Image: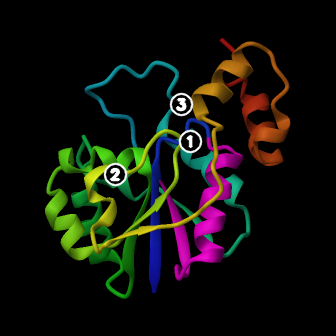
Protein backbone atom coordinates (compact mmCIF):
# COMPACT_ATOMS: atom_id res chain seq x y z
CA UNK A 1 0.00 0.00 0.00
CA UNK A 2 1.46 3.36 -1.03
CA UNK A 3 1.18 5.64 1.98
CA UNK A 4 2.09 9.31 2.27
CA UNK A 5 3.67 10.57 5.48
CA UNK A 6 2.86 14.18 6.26
CA UNK A 7 4.97 15.19 9.29
CA UNK A 8 4.27 18.18 11.48
CA UNK A 9 3.85 19.54 14.96
CA UNK A 10 0.19 20.26 14.07
CA UNK A 11 0.05 22.92 16.78
CA UNK A 12 -2.84 23.06 16.03
CA UNK A 13 -3.92 21.15 12.96
CA UNK A 14 -5.97 23.40 10.67
CA UNK A 15 -7.83 23.34 7.37
CA UNK A 16 -4.66 24.12 5.42
CA UNK A 17 -3.07 20.86 6.62
CA UNK A 18 -6.24 18.94 5.81
CA UNK A 19 -6.59 20.44 2.32
CA UNK A 20 -3.04 19.34 1.46
CA UNK A 21 -3.45 15.88 3.03
CA UNK A 22 -6.84 15.39 1.37
CA UNK A 23 -5.52 16.54 -1.99
CA UNK A 24 -2.60 14.09 -1.77
CA UNK A 25 -4.98 11.27 -0.82
CA UNK A 26 -7.48 11.96 -3.59
CA UNK A 27 -5.43 13.31 -6.51
CA UNK A 28 -2.21 11.25 -6.41
CA UNK A 29 -1.48 7.53 -6.46
CA UNK A 30 -1.37 7.38 -2.64
CA UNK A 31 -3.82 4.99 -0.97
CA UNK A 32 -3.60 6.80 2.37
CA UNK A 33 -1.99 9.80 4.01
CA UNK A 34 -0.83 9.59 7.61
CA UNK A 35 -0.50 12.84 9.54
CA UNK A 36 2.51 12.05 11.72
CA UNK A 37 2.46 14.23 14.83
CA UNK A 38 6.03 15.11 15.78
CA UNK A 39 6.84 15.03 19.49
CA UNK A 40 8.23 17.97 21.36
CA UNK A 41 11.99 18.14 21.04
CA UNK A 42 13.26 18.25 24.65
CA UNK A 43 16.24 20.34 23.53
CA UNK A 44 13.99 23.20 22.45
CA UNK A 45 11.78 25.45 24.58
CA UNK A 46 8.15 24.37 24.57
CA UNK A 47 6.71 27.86 24.14
CA UNK A 48 3.10 27.51 23.02
CA UNK A 49 3.52 23.89 21.89
CA UNK A 50 0.68 21.80 23.27
CA UNK A 51 1.54 18.49 24.90
CA UNK A 52 2.01 15.63 22.46
CA UNK A 53 -1.20 13.80 23.39
CA UNK A 54 -3.34 16.93 22.88
CA UNK A 55 -1.86 17.60 19.42
CA UNK A 56 -2.40 13.96 18.47
CA UNK A 57 -6.00 14.10 19.72
CA UNK A 58 -6.63 17.25 17.66
CA UNK A 59 -5.25 15.50 14.56
CA UNK A 60 -7.30 12.38 15.29
CA UNK A 61 -10.58 14.26 15.63
CA UNK A 62 -9.75 16.44 12.60
CA UNK A 63 -9.37 13.33 10.43
CA UNK A 64 -12.59 11.87 11.79
CA UNK A 65 -13.89 8.92 9.79
CA UNK A 66 -12.23 9.88 6.49
CA UNK A 67 -10.76 6.50 5.56
CA UNK A 68 -7.89 7.86 3.46
CA UNK A 69 -6.43 9.96 6.29
CA UNK A 70 -5.02 8.74 9.57
CA UNK A 71 -3.42 10.50 12.54
CA UNK A 72 -0.22 8.79 13.66
CA UNK A 73 1.77 9.05 16.86
CA UNK A 74 4.51 6.70 15.61
CA UNK A 75 7.26 9.13 16.57
CA UNK A 76 6.13 9.22 20.20
CA UNK A 77 7.69 5.76 20.72
CA UNK A 78 11.07 6.71 19.24
CA UNK A 79 14.13 8.33 20.87
CA UNK A 80 14.25 12.11 20.82
CA UNK A 81 15.09 14.14 18.93
CA UNK A 82 13.22 12.35 16.19
CA UNK A 83 14.90 11.96 12.81
CA UNK A 84 12.86 11.11 9.73
CA UNK A 85 15.23 8.29 8.75
CA UNK A 86 14.61 6.56 12.11
CA UNK A 87 10.86 6.99 11.77
CA UNK A 88 10.94 5.47 8.28
CA UNK A 89 12.92 2.44 9.49
CA UNK A 90 10.51 1.99 12.41
CA UNK A 91 7.40 2.30 10.22
CA UNK A 92 8.75 -0.17 7.65
CA UNK A 93 9.39 -2.68 10.45
CA UNK A 94 5.84 -2.19 11.74
CA UNK A 95 4.19 -2.11 8.29
CA UNK A 96 6.29 -4.13 5.81
CA UNK A 97 3.38 -4.14 3.32
CA UNK A 98 3.52 -0.32 2.96
CA UNK A 99 5.56 1.81 0.58
CA UNK A 100 6.12 5.11 2.37
CA UNK A 101 6.32 8.44 0.53
CA UNK A 102 7.27 11.70 2.23
CA UNK A 103 4.99 14.70 1.75
CA UNK A 104 6.57 18.11 2.24
CA UNK A 105 6.43 21.68 1.08
CA UNK A 106 8.90 23.09 -1.43
CA UNK A 107 10.43 25.12 1.43
CA UNK A 108 11.49 21.92 3.23
CA UNK A 109 12.99 20.44 0.08
CA UNK A 110 15.35 23.43 -0.11
CA UNK A 111 16.95 22.38 3.21
CA UNK A 112 16.59 18.62 2.72
CA UNK A 113 20.34 18.07 2.33
CA UNK A 114 20.72 19.09 5.99
CA UNK A 115 18.56 16.15 7.14
CA UNK A 116 20.20 13.14 8.75
CA UNK A 117 20.87 10.45 6.10
CA UNK A 118 19.03 12.43 3.40
CA UNK A 119 20.73 10.40 0.63
CA UNK A 120 19.41 7.15 2.12
CA UNK A 121 15.89 8.62 2.36
CA UNK A 122 15.98 9.65 -1.30
CA UNK A 123 17.38 6.30 -2.36
CA UNK A 124 14.49 4.36 -0.84
CA UNK A 125 11.54 6.79 -0.77
CA UNK A 126 9.77 9.16 -3.11
CA UNK A 127 9.03 12.69 -1.97
CA UNK A 128 5.83 14.44 -3.02
CA UNK A 129 6.25 18.21 -2.96
CA UNK A 130 3.44 20.72 -2.62
CA UNK A 131 4.04 24.41 -3.48
CA UNK A 132 4.90 26.99 -0.85
CA UNK A 133 4.88 30.70 -1.79
CA UNK A 134 8.37 32.01 -2.46
CA UNK A 135 10.07 28.60 -2.54
CA UNK A 136 11.05 26.74 -5.71
CA UNK A 137 12.36 23.60 -3.97
CA UNK A 138 16.04 24.24 -4.67
CA UNK A 139 18.50 21.95 -6.40
CA UNK A 140 16.70 18.68 -5.58
CA UNK A 141 13.51 19.70 -7.40
CA UNK A 142 14.53 17.73 -10.52
CA UNK A 143 15.65 14.60 -8.66
CA UNK A 144 13.97 11.47 -10.10
CA UNK A 145 12.47 10.57 -6.68
CA UNK A 146 10.93 14.03 -6.26
CA UNK A 147 7.41 14.52 -7.63
CA UNK A 148 5.80 17.96 -7.81
CA UNK A 149 2.11 17.86 -6.90
CA UNK A 150 0.10 20.92 -7.85
CA UNK A 151 -1.82 20.96 -4.57
CA UNK A 152 -3.65 24.18 -3.66
CA UNK A 153 -1.45 26.95 -2.28
CA UNK A 154 -2.16 27.29 1.44
CA UNK A 155 -0.95 30.31 3.36
CA UNK A 156 -2.73 29.43 6.59
CA UNK A 157 -0.31 28.57 9.40
CA UNK A 158 -0.52 27.22 12.93
CA UNK A 159 1.36 30.33 14.11
CA UNK A 160 -1.39 32.52 12.60
CA UNK A 161 -4.10 30.37 14.25
CA UNK A 162 -2.45 30.52 17.68
CA UNK A 163 -2.03 34.31 17.49
CA UNK A 164 -5.61 34.78 16.31
CA UNK A 165 -6.95 32.72 19.23
CA UNK A 166 -4.75 34.66 21.65
CA UNK A 167 -6.07 37.90 20.15
CA UNK A 168 -9.67 36.68 20.60
CA UNK A 169 -10.41 36.48 16.87
CA UNK A 170 -13.13 34.16 15.61
CA UNK A 171 -11.30 31.62 13.46
CA UNK A 172 -13.92 28.85 13.51
CA UNK A 173 -13.88 28.52 9.70
CA UNK A 174 -10.13 27.94 9.59
CA UNK A 175 -10.33 24.74 11.64
CA UNK A 176 -12.52 21.66 11.50
CA UNK A 177 -15.52 22.25 13.76
CA UNK A 178 -14.46 19.42 16.11
CA UNK A 179 -10.95 20.87 16.46
CA UNK A 180 -12.31 24.36 17.11
CA UNK A 181 -14.63 22.99 19.82
CA UNK A 182 -11.81 21.03 21.52
CA UNK A 183 -9.45 24.03 21.52
CA UNK A 184 -12.20 26.30 22.85
CA UNK A 185 -13.26 23.84 25.56
CA UNK A 186 -9.68 23.32 26.74
CA UNK A 187 -8.87 27.06 26.52
CA UNK A 188 -5.78 26.34 24.42
CA UNK A 189 -3.68 29.24 23.07
CA UNK A 190 -5.75 31.90 24.86
CA UNK A 191 -2.97 33.08 27.18
Task: Mark 3 or mark 2: name the one nearer the start of the chain.
Answer: 3
Dot 2 corresponds to which residue? 109
Q: What residue sits 54% from the left and 69% below the top? A: 33
Residue 73, image x, y percentages: 45, 55
Q: What residue sits 77% from the left and 39% below the top? A: 174
Q: Give neighbour class at mark 1: few <14, some 14-19, many 20+ (Cα, 10 Å).
A: many
Quarter containing the N terminus: bottom left
Estimate the spatial distance between the alpha carbons at disc 1 and disc 2, rounded to whole Å: 25 Å
Dot 1 corresponds to which residue? 55
Q: Give neighbour class at mark 2: few <14, some 14-19, many 20+ (Cα, 10 Å).
A: many
Mark 3 touches mark 1? (CB < 8 Å): yes
Estimate the spatial distance between the alpha carbons at disc 3 and disc 2, rounded to whole Å: 26 Å
Q: What residue sits 25% from the left and 42% below the top? A: 80
Estimate the spatial distance between the alpha carbons at disc 3 and disc 1, rounded to whole Å: 6 Å
Task: Mark 1 or mark 2: name the one nearer the start of the chain.
Answer: 1
Q: Is residue 22 above or below residue 62?
A: below
Res 163 label: none
Give the colouring mode of the picture: rainbow
Q: Is residue 38 visible?
A: no
Dot 3 corresponds to which residue? 50
Task: Mark 3 or mark 1: name the one nearer the start of the chain.
Answer: 3
Mark 3 touches mark 2? (CB < 8 Å): no
Magenta span includes 83: no
> What is the magenta range?
13-36
Element under label 3? loop
Element under label 1? helix
Amino acid sequence: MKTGLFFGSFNPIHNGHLVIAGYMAEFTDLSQVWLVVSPHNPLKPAGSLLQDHHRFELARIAVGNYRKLKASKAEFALPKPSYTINTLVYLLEQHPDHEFVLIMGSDNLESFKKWKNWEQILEHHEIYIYPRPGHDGGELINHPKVKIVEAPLMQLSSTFIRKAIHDKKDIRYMLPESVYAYIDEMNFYKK
